[in-house]
Image (cartoon, rainbow, N blue to C red):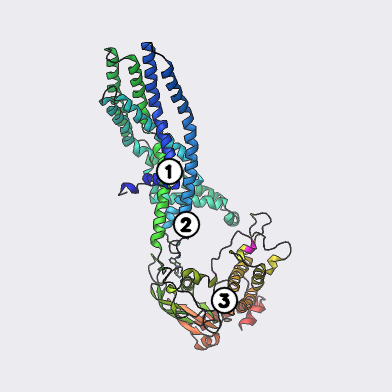
Amino acid sequence: MDRWVDHPQVIFFRTLFRASRTLTVLWWGLLVVGGVLPAVFAVASGSLIRAVEGGAALRGPLAVIGIVFVSMQVINPLHEAMGQLLGRRTSDHMNDRLIRAATGPPGISHMEDPERANDLSMARDFDLGITGPPLFVAMGFIAGGLQPLLGGLAAAVVLFGFTWWAPLVLVAGWGSTHLLLKESGVWRDRNTDEVRTAQRHADYAYSLAVDAPAAKELRLFGLGDWVVDRFAERRRRLFELYWEATRLRERSVLSSLLAVSVANALVFWRLAAAVADGSIPVGDAVVYLMAAIMVSSMAFGALSWALDTSAAPAAAVDRLVALFAATETLTAPSGSQATGIAPSGPSAGAHTIEFRNVGFTYPRASGPVLSGLDLRIEAGTSLAIVGQNGAGKTTLAKLLCRFYDPDEGLIEVDGRPLTDLDLDLWRSRVTAVFQDFVRYELSLRENVAPLGAPDEVIRDALAAAGADGLVSGPHDLDTPLSKGYPGGIDLSGGQWQRVALARAICGVKLGAGLVLLDEPTAQLDVRGETEIFRRLLEATSRCTTILISHRFSTVRLAERIAVVEGGRVIELGTHGELMALGGRYETMYSLQASRFVEVDAMGEEMVYDRLD
Ligand SMILES: Nc1ncnc2c1ncn2[C@@H]1O[C@H](COP(=O)(O)OP(=O)(O)O)[C@@H](O)[C@H]1O
Ligand SMILES: [Mg+2]
């Protein structure tokens, strides 16, 4: 930490204030009052004793003592409740900030940045009670640590009435425990990679054990004990690191004892002497005695760990928000510069796409994925992209959606640079099935049209995707697509893929002009895939369609085919042209066809017939 404003505890208190100004001010106010009241009580006791000694009226001093005493009883529960409220507000505020920072940027480089994993679990899980008490509970511990500290200081102020050096000596004595014992009480090392890694491993083992997706393999491969052992071992490692970092260090304990003993001996010896020679009256002596004892409450205690546990996630959220903002690389034109999109070409609504010498490297990646890529796709035509795993096919789709911008070259839409178009408007013109499409735990209707569409449109889209079976029988558009909800159903991988296809087709019906299909049928059988593709190309015939697939039986349904290799397009043409060329496409096609011959020998005639 170079600057004090960057200290996690400073960030924490700033976060409290940002979450709720009123509550924070009230919380501090009550904290101070609650801290000072014991000292006031001591002073009031002194005036009562003096009144008794001097035979004066007791009503005044008694009333003050009564009020102070009742206030002391009332303030703590009030402050506790306020702390809980403030804690919950602050949790909300932190979650809110994180969600906004994650969803806000137009690109996705910040979401794919490996750096974020370090802070993310701390920033996200802080309120689950795994790494420490949830914030609304921790607020009580923090107050419980701060209040005695203030109480001790307030009591010390009272001692100035006795002699100027007594409060200084006592505060120095008790205060030194904070310096001397800090190392042993605070887990300073909690942000080291070692701790974070142990934490992540423990969390991962935990989620493997309790989340549904891993249940099948855990049982089949007999991994149950392995997961438990792994969790226990990583947690133990975490605690070992903790104990190592916080175990009491003998020498600092001895020095603390010495400092505290000397300070107290000095003050109490002087006090005793003053009482003995009668230089201070008994009433005052009682007040100073009480105050001198009360200073001890400022000793090093539970404050540090509670504050540290709560401050770490607040700082993590700050770091993430900054990281997210810094990794955003899109150069979005400001409102006035951005231009709209006018449909062009023979098929109104479709777009002509052109990649000109496009080069792209992922942030923090060692080498480029694409370099010198040229490709033109006429409006209203379909193009299939083939290439080996990692060739950059998905990356092409991401660039077209402007999740990233190319580092070199240009992508043009209808002759205009993509970066000049209004981003939201452009995205409303694109629809897609991504390779890792989302299975929304929502109703079928919301899965097909998350932002809503007429029922007719949704049903048509489902039919075009061959998923109309889902709305027959007992199910309808409102059926939740997860068993976790009442009346919900679980879908197979293939069924989910049809739902994702329906979502893309629905996008076309709502006006999209560019369709991106990134291995959209990988989980369907070959027969289902061909049938779907015929219908899909029909449904998207008005659009420019880009299809990424490994299966040549579907690839050849596209009007043209591009082979991507080494970051560029190495072959481009119709199926017939590329076969005649006898290049990479022909090799890959023949390889796959010969594999199907074997499959054919096992009885799947359909496949062989179609490829032949
Ligand atoms: N977010 C990312 N950060 C860094 N490298 C990535 C990222 N996404 C993909 N890559 C890398 O870029 C290359 C191309 O990936 P991708 O476009 O997904 O290939 P394809 O879809 O053709 O299989 C691969 O080497 C992959 O590891
Ligand atoms: Mg891919």
Q: Position of residue 123 (x, y in %)?
A: 45, 51
Q: Considering only order in the chain, which callout, 1 or 3, is on the residue closer to the N terminus? A: 1
Q: Position of residue 424 (x, y in %)?
A: 49, 68
Q: Secondary structure at mark 2?
A: helix
Quadrant hosting residue 306: top left
Residue type pointed to by label 1: Thr
Residue type pointed to by label 2: Arg
Alpha-carbon neighbours of circle 3 within 10 Å: few (<14), some, or many (≥20)? some
Q: Measure how far apart labels 3 and 1 are at the Cα level.
A: 53 Å
Ligand 1: image quarter: bottom left
Which residue lies at the image location 27% right of the left edge and 19% below the top edge? 270
Is there any visible trace of residue 233 in the rendered image? no
Q: Which mark is residue 309?
A: 1
Quadrant hosting residue 475: bottom right
Q: Position of residue 564 (x, y in %)?
A: 47, 78
Left or right of 498, for residue 163: left
Q: Which residue is mark 2?
A: 100
Q: Which residue is mark 3?
A: 551
Which residues, given as a range, are shown in magenta?
433-445
Q: Position of residue 579 (x, y in %)?
A: 53, 86
Nearer the observer, 498 or 540:
540
Left or right of 43, for residue 267: left
In this rendering, the label closer to the viewer, 3 or 1: 1
Q: Is mark 3 within 8 Å of ligand 2?
A: no
Q: Measure how far apart labels 2 and 3 are at the Cα level.
A: 39 Å
